[in-house]
Amino acid sequence: MLAVVGTVPEEDFPLQAGEVTLEKEELFIGERRVKINRGTPALLAAAIQAGQALGEKKTYGFLAGDIGLGGGSRKLYEYLSRHLGKTEFSTIAFHYVQPDVDGHNRVLFSIEEMAKRPILIADAGFMYAAKMSGQAPEYDLSTPDVGELAFLADEMAPHPFYTRGFVLHEENRVPDLIARAYTHENAARYLLVKGRTDYLASREGIQATIQEPSVEALEAIGGTGDTLTGIVAALIAAGRQVSEAAIIAARVNRLAGFYANPTPGTSVREVIKHIPRALEQILQEMQRIKNGRR
Amino acid sequence: MGPPPEIRSGCDLVVEFPLMAELKIQKTLQDAGLPPLMLVPATSPLLQPVNLFQIKDFGRYLMVRAANMKLTVDKEGLTIVNVSGGGCPDVPYLAEQMVGKPLNEAPSPREIGHTLCGYALQLAFEETKRRCLPS
């Protein structure tokens, strides 16, 4: 089963651990409801939509309210460091959490106690914490955008805000930034870099690029990176290899975006609605190609 | 304690705080009439905040990126239509508070944000205002 760790932008939202369900445009966990907007709720909604299309019945969530003061994130670190070791998730996606090196390391220690190590995905604040702690290679997949990739590539930067100018200038040289991130041990086993072209990379170099369909407006829409992470997490939890799941997810996210016919002012909710249709189409195309080869 | 030699300028006092809370700490010190001479990461005191902006013009919409944060406005009504990027938990909160508001009425990330992602969004916000609002 997939577990998602993250925060919701409500100060008084208590820590919740449990199954997350999706009804219309809201998520439900415990007795709380969560509006679907950018951030971890968008990741969860995308993961649930994709998971259901893949036959996965349940998605688990560890959520706490945090508006940037860090209180909810500290509760999450504390809870996970005490409880994660006894759980049996196949895949865990870590997301919007206030970066905290000590908290991050305690969570990683608790994962070591799990009977079977899950596939680990780090995005957003947790990806920052993984890099800051020097533990980025412990993760199977990270999903940075180009700005975040520059941060991973800059071995000196403690946060994207302090990425050095000469590294940021290399925006159009994504392969060089990827290589630099691996050289300094600041990248996960796989990187799925989202942008005008999506790149799947590993220590061995670029494994695949995905450019179609090209929907320029998606870059401006808050949450489209979160939906990508949600889709890839659901595919991995359903049994796909990380590299295959990343390529499928990139194509599905683009196609769902295309079906939403967005402007830069569109909400990510419009994209999420089209994930099941896009996923079905991409999987059918892949099956046709596979059958054609026989 | 004293600052590292690279940034020492006299009989300076250093206050160490979690880097993530930079925006909140800066605001607190300023409100108390104690604006800091400098804010630097303890591990690399010579690093500077990002000062490069990437601009993307979609025609009707303009997107400004500072570091990992992107802010998009509708040029016709000067309304903030999207906030994207970032990884700290105040980003979804800031987006909720800012999206849909006119550029000159939206709350500033400096006022309601707390983290370095909020700080990066503040820079994108200022650059967008500089480009879109009459000076």
Image (cartoon, coloured by chain):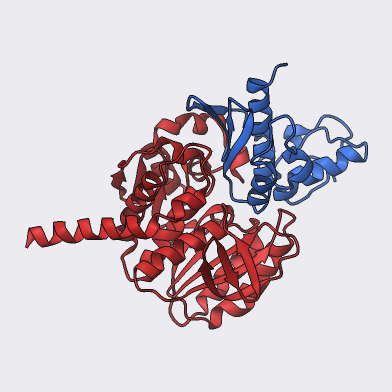
Q: Is residue A134 above or below residue B25?
A: below
Give coordinates of residue A9: x percent, y percent.
Answer: 67, 56
Left or right, A231 with respect to B130, comes to: left
Residue at the image position 64 percent from the left and 40 percent from the top:
B100
Any part of residue A76 in sight: yes
Identify which residue, A100 or B119, lies in the foreground. Answer: B119
Which chain has been coloured red in this picture? A
Image quarter hosting the C terminus of chain A:
bottom left
Give coordinates of residue B87: x percent, y percent.
Answer: 59, 50
Among the 4 quarters of the image, the one containing residue B38:
top right
Give coordinates of residue A22: x percent, y percent.
Answer: 51, 68
Among the 4 quarters of the image, the one containing residue A12:
bottom right
Identify which residue, A47 or A137, lies in the foreground. Answer: A47
Identify which residue, A103 or A284, lies in the foreground. Answer: A284
Q: Is residue B121 above or below residue A271?
A: above
Outermost top residue:
B135
Any part of residue B2 in sight: no
Left or right, A68 with respect to B61, comes to: right
